[in-house]
């Protein structure tokens, strides 16, 4: 099977899984959202106490473990670390702040588009702008530095921690916080969420599907392979939404969204720029963390910390009304920080 | 033979470096240590109408671009 078809098939799996998860109980246009789900997990662990977004999402566990298992089977599990872990933590933090001002990661942006939410179209323009800025730095030599080989214990620490928390969630749920209303209270049965996560983790690991990579590769090397995955997610979810009567075109009254266009644009600009700097979107970071990359695990931990801050300091947008002053200031600071890191890591390189 | 060591670098840096190196040199060996970089560099070089061959060397790959 050609690579292009494999990537498109993986995209179709993800798009259909997303529609199925909504059918089984996940929030509308949120079959998958890496940013929202990490935020919900941070809430379940009481790293923040926003009552409507607390649930230990098994999809995230499935994605990490799916990637871990399939990479071990194929000999692609390679523990490595040392490529600016603290910078990656900070970039992950900034990506999460941007995502929660828009209310979704790049994957949910595509799913929102497939549900007819035109606010996501504005966000897509911001995402492309952010990726474009990132590509300028990349082509001038931006790098977070080389990773080196790490121990097997280091490489498995993140997937093992995920597994431990998941077992705890199943065995002693009283330890965790769970939403009784709002998006956090809406979820598919645990087994279905986990299975969907595993399927997506395996499909995305084998194809290296990445929401930011698709657009980045077009800008940098005129390669359309990864964009096929992006398009397939959209088409599969669109067909699924049309078939189940969940498609509604427009800006107003879209599920878990707002219509403050400037902030949707800037939020996803931060996500696009940060994703290029990290070498991939939030989904790809989970996949790489499952493959043994400590650096990507640091980015994921940064996202979790960013989610906790976003709700503890009222940075996240509210559905319907959008971000408040804190959120707007935070996105601007996040973009400035990303640009500063990008500039510093471009100027310092010899070649 | 010009050799480009991209081991330890994450995508898309190896591809960007390969692209730059191919502007200066028609023939090139690129060293990578993860499958994503291997596939991306091979795909890019093939798109540039180059002959591409990759051999595994321990935990990394040597991609010959001619």
Image (cartoon, coloured by chain):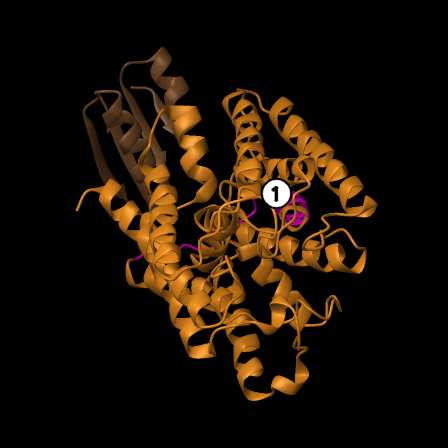
Residue A86 in magenta?
yes
Q: Is residue A123 left or right of residue A322?
A: left
In the rendered image of the structure, the colour used to display chain A is orange
Q: Is residue B45 above or below residue A53?
A: above
Magenta span of residues:
A75-98
Q: Helix or strand or loop: what does disc 1 sit on?
A: loop
Q: Quadrant of residue A269?
A: top right
Quadrant in the rendering for residue A185: bottom right
Image quadrant where residue A303 sits: bottom right
Q: Position of residue B23 (x, y in %)?
A: 36, 13
Instruction: Kindly identify the residue that appears in the image at 53 percent across and 50 percent down.
Output: A282
**Dot 1 crowding, Cα within 10 Å, few <14, some 14–19, many 20+:** some
Considering depth in this image, is B12 or B59 the residue closer to the camera? B12
What residue is shown with label 1? A84
Q: Please, is residue A56 above or below residue A111 in the view? A: below
What residue is shown at x 53% (from left), y 76% (from top)? A166
Tell me what hue chain B is rendered in.
brown
């Amino acid at each position: 099977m050609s690579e292009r078809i494999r990537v498109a098939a993986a995209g179709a799996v993800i798009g259909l899984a997303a529609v199925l998860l909504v059918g089984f109980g996940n929030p509308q246009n949120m079959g998958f959202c890496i940013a929202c789900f990490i935020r919900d997990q941070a809430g379940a662990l009481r790293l923040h106490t926003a009552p409507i977004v607390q649930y230990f999402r098994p999809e995230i566990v499935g994605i990490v473990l799916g990637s871990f298992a399939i990479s071990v089977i194929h000999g692609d599990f390679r523990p490595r670390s040392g490529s600016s872990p603290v910078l990656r933590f900070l970039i992950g933090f900034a990506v999460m702040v941007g995502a929660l001002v828009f209310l979704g990661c790049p994957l949910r942006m595509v799913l929102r588009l497939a549900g007819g939410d035109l606010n996501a179209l504005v966000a897509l323009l911001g995402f492309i702008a952010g990726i474009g800025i990132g590509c300028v730095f990349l082509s001038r030599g931006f790098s977070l530095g080389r990773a080196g080989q790490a121990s097997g214990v280091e490489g498995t620490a993140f997937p093992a921690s995920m597994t431990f928390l998941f077992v705890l969630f199943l065995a002693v749920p009283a330890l965790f916080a769970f939403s009784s209303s709002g998006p956090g209270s809406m979820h598919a049965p645990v087994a279905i969420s986990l299975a969907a996560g595993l399927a997506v983790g395996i499909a995305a690991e084998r194809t290296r599907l990445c929401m930011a990579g698709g657009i980045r590769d077009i800008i940098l090397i005129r390669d359309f392979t990864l964009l096929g995955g992006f398009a397939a997610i959209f088409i599969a979810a669109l067909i699924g939404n049309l078939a189940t009567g969940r498609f509604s075109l427009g800006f107003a009254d879209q599920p878990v969204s707002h219509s403050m266009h400037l902030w949707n644009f800037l939020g996803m600009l931060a996500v696009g720029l940060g994703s290029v700097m990290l070498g991939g979107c939030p989904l790809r970071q989970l996949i790489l963390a499952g493959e043994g990359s400590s650096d990507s695990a640091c980015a994921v931990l940064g996202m979790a910390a960013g989610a906790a801050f976003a709700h503890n300091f009222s940075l996240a947008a509210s559905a319907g009304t959008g971000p408040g002053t804190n959120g707007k200031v935070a996105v601007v600071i996040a973009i400035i920080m990303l640009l500063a890191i990008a500039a510093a890591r471009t100027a310092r390189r010899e070649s | 033979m010009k050799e480009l060591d991209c081991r330890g670098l994450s995508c898309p840096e190896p591809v960007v470096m390969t692209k730059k190196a191919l502007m200066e040199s028609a023939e090139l060996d690129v060293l990578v240590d993860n499958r994503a970089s291997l596939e991306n560099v091979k795909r890019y070089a093939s798109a540039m109408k180059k002959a591409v061959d990759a051999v595994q060397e321990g935990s990394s790959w040597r991609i010959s671009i001619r």
